[in-house]
Amino acid sequence: MTDEASPRVRAALPRGLVDRAPADIAAAEAMMVKIRAVYELYGFEAVETPFIEYTEALGKFLPDQDRPNEGVFSFKDDDEQWLSLRYDLTAPLARYVAERYEKLPKPYRSYRAGWVFRNEKPGPGRYRQFMQFDADTVGSATPAADAEICMMAADCLEALGIRRSDYVIKVNNRKVLDGVMEAIGLGGAENAARRLTVLRAIDKLDRLGPEGVRALLGAGRKDESGDFTKGAGLDAAAIERVLAYTAARAKDNAATLVALAAAVAGSPTGEAGVEDLREIAGLARAVGYGEDRVLLDPSVVRGLEYYTGPVFEAELTFETRGEDGKPIRFGSVGGGGRYDGLVARFRAEPVPATGFSIGISRLLAALRAIDSPIVAGAARPGPVVVVVLDRDRLADYQRLVATLRAAGIAAEMYLGASGLNAQLKYADRRGSLCAIIQGSNERDAPGGREVVIRDLRLGAELAKASKDRADYLELRQKAQFAVAEAAMVARVREIVARR
């Protein structure tokens, strides 16, 4: 009789997903504590929505007859209803508010943190699952609500240890760009495709410069590899108008407003957008958020098909070195804007709303790059490991563990079958600060029961510091010492406090 082995399952993650180690989890939680404190300081309250919603409630993506559209993970319920994993935290909030609209205070101010899912092709920095931390004000149409979101975003970055000179909150307005489109004859639904081409061209301003954008606004552009990108096909006057709009950004918000006003002259929609920006910048400046923190920038065009008014982007401006030594910039780590049409999908009357979302994973990578003490300090040591030398005395070792836990110190009894050296290596791999050792000599000590405490971090440091054997033995005594059982908790606390 032969026993055929079962085929082994390949241990591999799907593309676009990542596992999180304890250090990653601790760092993200430390970040969210800081962000949450700022959100609550501004009067926002917590709410939580499920990972799964009816697909039609999400709004942006709807399933066709055979399969979900690209962009969202969906499946059919047993009643043939399409359900989807949420792709952001805003659409579920809109559904939540619409269901409870009569009961909620208006404006309704809330924050949410959680995982979102995108059924998109993964790539560098592009994941299928990632965490966001949002704050939204629903029920207020005033630009003061948008200004407050911008100020709160700035406060969040500074609370995380990012210097004032290393970030900027950029602000644009969908209405301003709509005004430019109207002025060049691209208003209306029939021009939606050409408008999108124009938006994509403007979005490449930082990378391609004005001349590259000019080519994309016209017939098209051939890149260095020879690939050709078809342009928007605008005439010369229209191209100059769009370029005048992109050139309106300046380090002075007042100058930007003057240039934007000229770019949208004759468009009521555009002029209303400029006034919104004027009020946002004025309110921010009045309380100390000048251009070094909140900057008007017409190059911010991402998400303008989704947003209905002001849009915001939190951008990190510093450079750091990647693993290959080359300079990198993290750029945008959060964004948001006004989305007055989303909640209104569920109700007969319009419901204004504005909000901001922080990308936790991307911001965490940036904080690590600048050695943020918030992230570095989030790493938690492993538990104190009680070494097991005598298998017939497990109750004694468990009693030591219980004593440490009762004192609020994380501890575990070694549950493997290895010897002393292997157990100490295990404790080191766990990131433990110290190990507790008790053999027959310690239990039968003349002055009463003792334990040996090994300071694992100090032991490793001292071993590297001296190669002389006599010095090594002397220093080792400082890293490993015997104490009475009654003093164990106090001495362990001393080691923990040093670290």
Image (cartoon, helix red, strand yellow):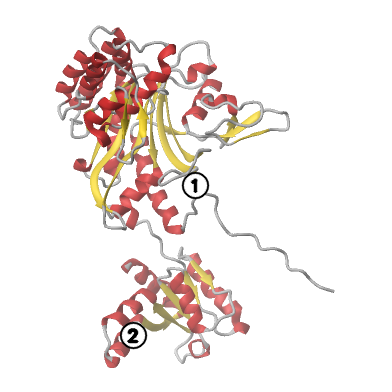
Q: What residue is shown with label 2?
A: 476
- Residue 99 shown left or right of residue 365 in the figure: right
Q: Is residue 33 visible?
A: no
Q: Quadrant of the N terminus?
A: bottom right
Rendered image: mark on residue 341: none
Dot 1 falls on a residue whose secondary structure is loop
Q: In this view, does 392 lie above or below 127?
A: below
Residue 419: % across, % down? 54, 84
Residue 246: % across, % down? 23, 24
Residue in front for this viewpoint, 492 or 435: 435
Whichever of callouts 2 and 1 sits on the residue coming sooner in the sequence is 1
Farthest residue in the front direction?
A: 226
Q: Which residue: 46% across, 29% down?
A: 90
Residue in front for this viewpoint, 471 or 245: 245
Residue 161: % across, % down? 27, 47
- Residue 391 shown left or right of residue 91 in the figure: right
- Residue 285 shown left or right of residue 357 in the figure: left
Farthest residue in the right direction?
A: 1
Q: What residue is shown with label 1?
A: 16
Dot 2 falls on a residue whose secondary structure is helix
Q: Is residue 65 visible?
A: yes
Q: Which residue: 42% across, 79% down?
A: 453
Q: Which residue: 36% across, 74% down?
A: 457
- Corner quadrant of residue 4: bottom right
Residue 5: % across, % down? 73, 68
Q: Which amino acid does label 1 sit on?
A: Gly
